[in-house]
Amino acid sequence: MKKIALLLILLWGAAAGFAQQVTVLGHVADRKNNPLLGATVSVVEAPAVREMVDSTGGFKISATIGNKLIISKAGVGLKYVKITSADPLSVVLDYRDEVVLLPHGVERRAEELTGAISVLKSEELMKSSSLNLSNALFGNILGLSALQNGGVDWENNASLFVRGSKTLSNNSLLVVVDGLERSIDNIVLDEVESVEVLRDAAAVARYGFRGINGVLAVTTKRGQYNSKSITFRYDHGFKQPVRLPEFANSYRYANAINEARANDGLSPRYNAYEVDAFKNGTYPGVYPNVDWFDEVLKDWSSTNIYSLSFKGGGKNARYFTVLNLETSDGLLKNADANSGYSTQLKSSKGNVRTNFDIDLTSTTALQVNILGILGETNRPGTHQSTLMDQLYSVPSAAFPVRALDGKWGGDATWTNQNPVANSISTGYARSQTRALQADVKLTEKLNFITPGLSASLRVGYDNYTEYWESKTKGFNYSNNVIVFDQAGNPIDTTTTVGGKVSQLNYTSSLGVQSRRLNIVTSVDYEKVFGESKFGASIMHHHDHLVNSGRDQTYNRENISGSFNYGYANRYFADLVLMASGSNRLKGLKEWAFSPTISAAWVLSNENFLKDSKLVNFLKLRASAGIINTDYVPELDLGTQAYVGGSSYYLGDSPQKVDGWKVGRTPTANPTTEKAYKYNVGVDAMLLNSLQLTADCFFERRSDIFVITGGQNTLIYGAFDPYANDGKVDSKGVELGLDYAGKVGRDFSWFAGAKYTFSRSKIVESLETPQPYDYLKRTGKSISQLFGYQVLGMFKDQQDIDNSPRQTLSAVKPGDFKYKDQNGDGVIDALDMVAMGYNTVCPEIYYSFNIGAEYKGFGFSAILQGVGNYSALLNTKSVYKPLIGNSTISNDYYENRWTPTNLTAKYPRLTTVDSDNNFANNSTWIADRSFVKLRNCEVYYSFPKQLLSKIKLNTAKIYVRGVDLLCFDNLDIVDPESYGVNYPTLKSYHVGLSIGF
């Protein structure tokens, strides 16, 4: 018995030795060796034991030899460290430990990811001075094509594509903010912690129907434990129009219109004396020379950004709050000419964001996110789109700004189209927007059931409303014409008056209104055993959206099971099983199943690479999955539609009664559009400096809704049903390189490049049978342009007679001559061929960035370009002059066909809309490739030693330029935003940021 007792004592002592309790001291830093203030350190085996990293990066925690520590900081990184002794620990969260946020707050280490996800951090984002988030993304994230659009600041949001165009239906991507679908337009840069682009099936699998075209995920900033900081930022911008169209002066216009009318067999608009008056400027009050752009637009406008943020927390709570105000002033001249109101195009928007994280108990966490937005815009009573149309239409010779009697200039040809009068004397319209985005998440650890088990409930409510009020009025105008005698002497002046002066008329209306309810419940489990790590999540997501208008209530349900497994930090696998339902599929299959599988192999953790000095990190990835979407071209496709028919007179006293007739017939056996996605990729870090990402992808989009009457016919039967017969293939590559180097103690530099190539091919669209293969859209890319091949211009009537018969419209010398593609002796629609690419999304999207810093002085720049991208040049007056009483650009006038300029760039002048000259052709379909200097910054960060004396943590001043240079082939118009648009702007900014 004594021997047994002694043995038990020895075993107990050995066990106690193996379970030795120690106090561990450590230091935590990021890969740039900055201390990670506010990071948490907890024990895997005892989750309630948790300590915070202090401002020096230090921590102290009690644990047992053999335990694992979790070192984490939200939005920065997460790492597991095994305790093998009581010796101090030095922990660095490097690139493989960076955290990527998956749907609804699930964090995964970059090393463990099996999907294709690109990340843009806040520090890179803040190099932009954009008023909206989308315009800060040009060339900044691999896999995302961001393209600038025309418009005033509050409308000028970028077009966004992930891996190009992939379907004949809807190619728009999904935007989520903190895991919930929300507009990117409401987010300001100071709120954002990171932006992620989810590119393959594994990355988008948890988003159900809405993730089929890729996902842009925005994560907002959060507080950090045991800290407090205040940051103030101010940015002032000067914006200048670029590439405004240069229209002909009045003398040149008068000659052009007379020449065009002569070509059309019409009498001249202006007699010789009037033409001389334009040339000599002898009667400017009657025969003016008005530069309408100069009269209406200023040379500069301005923007302001004011931002004040508070970030910090204690031991059990964290907070982040930002107060942001953005103002933008437009380009209109004399906008304050009226007493009591302005007609300026301007906007102001205030954002208040507050994010709270509260540890209610050691097992219960509460997260609260609130965003409130107040916005206001102002414009003239004449909408800016109408005003821009007038600037592109009214000739310099039409009428003076003011007539001889002081009234606004105008006449019957350009009725009420005086651009200056419309910018000043039509009153104003003003919108006010109110938005609230709020969500609450409660998470409970269920370790009492089994360690690693937790459950959460999240409820989100969003509301957006836009109100309009306007006070508009009319104006009158007069027009003067001089009567000349035969010697050219003025003998009389005639005056006509038009329009009507009115008082300000008040109206108000509800513009856009929407509300959204999200309810997300999930049960999550994570277990580390030996070298294995297993995770599982069961989630239900209810999304209820109500927009203003008819049939605008949408309900979506997602039920998913997600499972992940990792072994020895080398092998990882993910499986996602998603069932999605939507009321948009009423009459179809309302539920669809989307499975996705993916895997990764971290080669750098294998023994043969573990100690490599060249390869610090190397991971191979592969994924495959089926993603469905609830997009339908029309609601109730599965039921018979009825439309208005003939009218009948019925009754003793006959009354007209509208009839009905059969409309579009039902779709037979409808189903959901599907994407079969495949991706292989590699992530690497070499020499601790060069980061590489490369992906190859293929996608087959099937069951696309197409019209059975022929997808590409010019006029198809209005009642032809849809069928799920469309198929599109898309494939491409993505490459990303980033290098960061340091020379000595004070000089650091970086450089990088990103490249995306994506090409689509229509496999099936129920295209009408074509007599020649070159006419087929099938086999071509989505939105492929077709046109006629220009051989030159007809020299004379003999040239016309000796050429194939023209059927597009009657032709004259100076009109385009086209190639007879099929040799049938006739120019018609059968002679159109594929030309260029498309005008929607480029096949090639790339960027280069570079920067350096020395003792606080630094610079950074990013160049972004596109290729395999086309422009269809059809801008009023610029490329299509004099039609509909429009003006003419100098470029067209100087390069037009005349009997003495037979090799001209453009056809003869005409006032008649010519189907022959203005059809799509090789002159109007132009190369839209460009490279732009998107952002260039020079800055100075004050040294910490100096700042500490005045109680500051950080201080930075900068000068920044945006869209300063553009290299392209179009020259006279902006390649991104050509057409009758508000001018494209380049901008210069000065700013400062101060941290307390």
Image: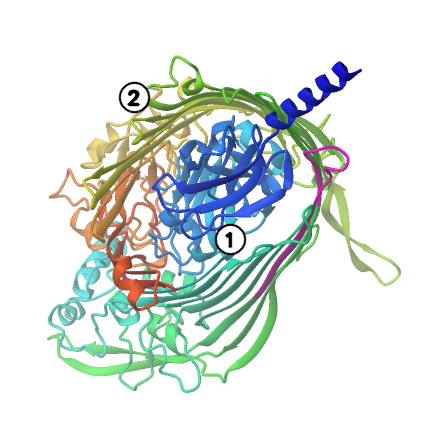
Q: Quarter of the image containing the N terminus?
A: top right
Q: Which mark is residue 708?
A: none
Among the 4 quarters of the image, the one containing residue 774 = top left
Total number of numbered discs in the rendering: 2
Q: Residue 940: where, in percent of width, then height?
A: 23, 57
Disc 1, SS:
loop
The residue where tag 1 is placed is 224
Give the left or right position of residue 890, taking residue 450 as reference.
Answer: left
Give the left or right position of residue 531, taking residue 157 as reference.
Answer: right
Q: Residue 652: where, in percent of width, then height?
A: 89, 61
Q: Residues within 10 Å of mark 1 (few under 14, many from 20)?
A: many
Residue placed most toward the observer, 439 or 359: 359
Residue located at (25% from left, 55% from top): 961
Residue located at (42% from left, 38% from top): 144
Query: Does 438 appear in magenta?
Result: yes
Q: Which residues are magenta?
A: 434-456
Residue extending farthest to the front is 2
Give the left or right position of residue 803, taking residue 782 as reference.
Answer: left
Residue located at (44% from left, 20% from top): 605
User: Decide: marks 2, 1 in contact (CB < 8 A)?
Assistant: no
Query: Does 964 appear in magenta?
Result: no
Residue placed most toward the observer, 226 or 681: 226
Disc 2, SS:
loop
The residue where tag 2 is placed is 614
Q: Amino acid at mark 2?
A: Leu
Residue located at (49% from left, 55% from top): 187
Q: Is residue 295 visible?
A: yes
